[in-house]
Image: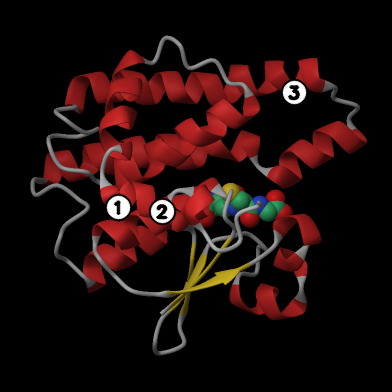
Amino acid sequence: MKLYGYWRSSASYRVRIALALKNIDYDYVAVNLLEGEQKTADYLAIHPNGLVPALVTDNGEAIVQSLAIMEYLEDAFPEPAILPASATERAQARAIAATIACEAQPFMNMRMQNFLREEKSFDDAAMGDWLNRFTGSAMAAAEALARKTAGRYCVGDTPSIADCCLVPQWFGAARFGVDVSTFTKLAEIYQRCIARPAFEKAHPMNQPDAAA
Ligand SMILES: N[C@@H](CCC(=O)N[C@@H](CS)C(=O)NCC(=O)O)C(=O)O
């Protein structure tokens, strides 16, 4: 199986964590977003929206969207699980994952930031306001959800897709200056996650295409 990704992409990082938690071997294909490799015809044939990550199975089927990829991995390789056992907890884990992946991260996306800076004259201050308003409020919602559901991790005591989303989001928030100081539950879970080898293996700096 091949994972098309970019070292600093938070959506790619989510999938790398899921693969590492499940001990799945894969080939990593770096797509250099700064060089526009996500917009080549070859890559668009895999991911029509020109985003990373994309997973190509050993049968040659392309799967896109990090949440769908993680759900695929759970279905195809059930153990160890990255969704809790009960229906309620599964929904809670998916809800936190979706809050981060659908409502926090998109505002940080490169094409969004480029558009705002280049075509809407956003300066650093405007971009900071934008990110703190929209990414920050979605992260606040994730914090509120996790306060209800967390044990050692976002939902219960086992890492799930919610944690696969949280850790890259925390990394991205630090990179873009989103104020996370009040998200104490997420901070506690983040620290617990990054102490685990699977999360370390998936870290951007440990990828072959990481900038020196
Ligand atoms: N909803 C998508 C988001 C993917 C996404 O935003 N990818 C970013 C990197 S984190 C990307 O490829 N950006 C390239 C661009 O903006 O052109 C997913 O979860 O897979």
Q: Quadrant of residue 134?
A: top right
Q: Position of residue 3 (x, y in %)?
A: 48, 70
- Mark 1: give few (<14), some (14-19) or many (20+) Cα within 10 Å: some
- Mark 2: give few (<14), some (14-19) or many (20+) Cα within 10 Å: many
Q: Amino acid at mark 2?
A: Ala
- Considering only vertical position in the picture, is 159 above or below 130? below
Q: In the visual, does 96 lie left or right of 209?
A: left
Helix, strand or loop status at disc 1 = helix
- Report the residue at 14% width, 39% height from top: 88
Q: Position of residue 206 (x, y in %)?
A: 48, 54
The residue identified by callout 2 is 202
Q: Amino acid at mark 1?
A: Ala
Give the farthest residue toward the front.
212
- The answer to the question of whether label 1 and label 2 lie on touching residues, with beta carbons closer than 8 A, is yes
Q: Position of residue 204 (x, y in %)?
A: 51, 49
Give the farthest residue toward the bottom.
59
**Disc 3 to disc 2, C-alpha distance:** 28 Å
Q: In the visual, does 105 lie left or right of 40?
A: left
**Disc 1 to disc 3, C-alpha distance:** 33 Å
Foreground of the two, 144 or 195: 195
Helix, strand or loop status at disc 3 = helix
The residue identified by callout 1 is 198
The residue identified by callout 3 is 127
Q: Position of residue 199 (x, y in %)?
A: 34, 47
